[in-house]
Image (spheres, rainbow, N blue to C red):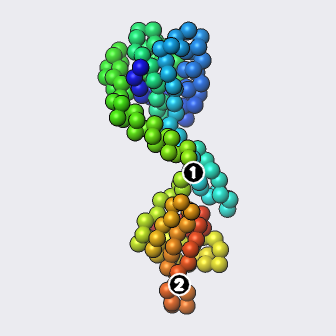
Amino acid sequence: MRWYIIQAFSGYEKQVQRSLIERIKRSGLEEQFGDVLVPTEEVVEMREGKKRTVEHKLFPGYVLINMEMTEDTWHVVKDCPNITGFIGGTPENPAPITQVEADRILNRIQKGGDTPRPKTLFEPGEEVLVIDGPFTDFKGLVKKVDYDKSKLHLTVSVFNRPTDVELEFTKVEKLV
């Protein structure tokens, strides 16, 4: 079995995944198919002042499928609603992705499932705006980023004196 990438209508990835699994069962070709995946990761974001964990698609509009390519399996996938076709190769003879590419995607999915990552990534030297807490509306300069604890070490100017503070990612936003 090899990994193939299917292009689906954007926003219909989960529906395509469910449809494919159902079609595979109905066709009786389960032995020729492996996993059908919509690569996602958990992301922490702020909405209406609350921290929420949301599922973020790594590759919007694409579904991964592990399968043996035969005439029958090709038709099961190709005739599924909301699928525009395979990525790579020709429409009649799709090309699988390499095992290295598949492993990279699968590892990223696995790593993303362990702990939610912040929606916004920060770097030292970057200027941010504090949006919550006692330093609201202060601008700060990122000194250190602690992704394990989801905290930033900032320098903010209080009465024209540099002051070091530690804030959660959710209490700041990047300046454009």
Going by the numbered disc 2, the residue's amino acid type is Thr
Point out residue 126 in the picture as x, y percentages from the top left corner: 43, 70
In this picture, residue 93 sits left or right of residue 144:
left
Q: Disc 1 on helix, strand or loop?
A: loop
Give above or below for 48 relative to 156. Answer: above
For the residue pair 19 and 153, the one nearer the viewer reads as 153
Where residue 66 sits in the image (x, y, percent)? Answer: 45, 23
Few, some or many residues within 10 Å of mark 2 (<14, 14–19, 20+): few
Which quarter of the rendered picture does the C terminus lie within?
bottom left
In the rendering, at what x and y percent does residue 119 appear?
Answer: 53, 55
Rendered location of residue 163, percent (x, y):
53, 84
Looking at the picture, tell me which residue is in the foreground, 77 or 155: 155
Quarter placement of the N terminus = top left
Q: Is residue 15 left or right of residue 111?
A: right
Question: On the picture, is 9 further left or further right than 49?
Answer: left
Mark sitting earlier along the chain (2/1): 1
Depth check: give the residue in front, 150 or 125: 150
Q: Nearer the viewer, residue 20 or 143?
A: 143
Give neighbour class at mark 1: few <14, some 14-19, many 20+ (Cα, 10 Å): some
Res 141 visible = yes
Q: What residue is drawn where x is 63% and y is 71%?
A: 132
- Mark carried by residue 163: 2
Residue at the image position 50 percent from the left and 71 percent from the top: 128
Amino acid type, residue under disc 1 in the picture: Pro
Can you say whether 31 is above or below 106 in the image? above
Let me know if residue 10 appears in the view: no
| Above or below, comparing residue 92 to residue 53 in the picture | above
Q: CA distance from mark 2 to mark 1?
A: 30 Å
- Where is residue 118, by image quadrant? bottom right
Q: Which residue is mark 1?
A: 116
Name the element at disc 2.
strand
